[in-house]
Amino acid sequence: MTSTTSPASPASIVFETVAPGSVAYLDRLAATDLGRLYKGRMLDALDVRTGQTVLDIGCGPGTDLGALADAVSGTGTGPRTTEGTGSRTAAGTDTAARTASGSAPARSPGAVIGVDHDQVAVDTARERTAGRDTVTVHLGDVHELPLADGSVDRARTDRVLQHVADPVRALCEAHRVLRPGGRLVLGEPDWDTLTVDHPDEELSRAYTRYVTDEVIRNARIGRQLPRLAAEAGFTVPTVVPVTPAFRDVGAADKVLGLERTTRRALAAGYFTVGGARRWLDHLASGPFLAAVTFYIVVAQA
């Protein structure tokens, strides 16, 4: 394949040309400002209560299982509500349920269940949560969850439905395993909103068109979540759009894989060789701006 960069090109220095492994990529994204921002918002929207059972659908290498375990056990830093009491105090302390003698009644430690289809991710998640008795991780398919009906109180999916074969079926499975009144929090990008500034707008459009046409199976899933969740039997009280702006090309490349994606777009005919070079050279040397909208959706069973 013809190279999109030359040794003298600024793009040959700026961009990462070898893709990280899937586990490394997920860890990297979670550590970014974007990752911390939206994951924190998703956890807040999940409103986990002490003693509940929480399901992470498509848990990957267990990136979020520790925070969920802290939430169900009441050891997280934010306020929590003890299951069945309705009294909200710091770290899950249920003052209203204390006995006359001043001691708190025993409460369930809660449970966190991770499910993922990838054996490497499951093995990694199990290793990372080996010291947490409340966490179990299963190999399984989001279209056919290995759980009983009505067995969980809260569930989440984080950038999973953009890749699955049948999002509605996956959502129906989430609805099945949730107890009546349970909550599902979904987080998905809408790749059709991806904008990368370039003096040649046709190159920008070609890049986004390639991503939505060829790279992501369900590229517009973000905007579709409320409708698809309703089709699966949920009510949707809350939709929160989050649009991070990338000003640093290196940071954006670690998330978007700009050079690698451009090479594939060139091979697929979305760029000419000259267009691909002009695209990357400007991104590497000029003022940089990119943005994409990420949707957080709260769905009630």
Image (cartoon, grey):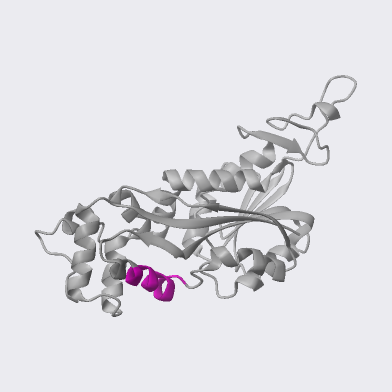
Furthest-left residue in this view? 8
Residue 49: x and y in percent read: 72, 41
Q: Is residue 164 left or right of residue 193?
A: right
Asked if residue 150 lies in the magenta stretch, the reply is no
Q: Residue at x 30, y 61 (%)?
A: 258
Instruction: Find residue 207 and report its image quarter.
Output: bottom left
Residue 271: x and y in percent read: 26, 75
Q: Residue at x 48, y 52 (%)?
A: 243
Q: Is residue 284 above or below residue 50?
A: below
Looking at the image, which is closer to me, 264 or 282? 282
Q: Residue at x 51, y 49 (%)?
A: 63
Residue 64: x and y in percent read: 55, 48
Looking at the image, which is closer to me, 123 or 168? 168
Regarding residue 129, the answer to whether it shows in the image is no
Furthest-top residue in this view? 101
Looking at the image, which is closer to me, 163 or 205? 205
Q: Is residue 103 left or right of residue 279?
A: right
Which residues are drawn in magenta? 205-216
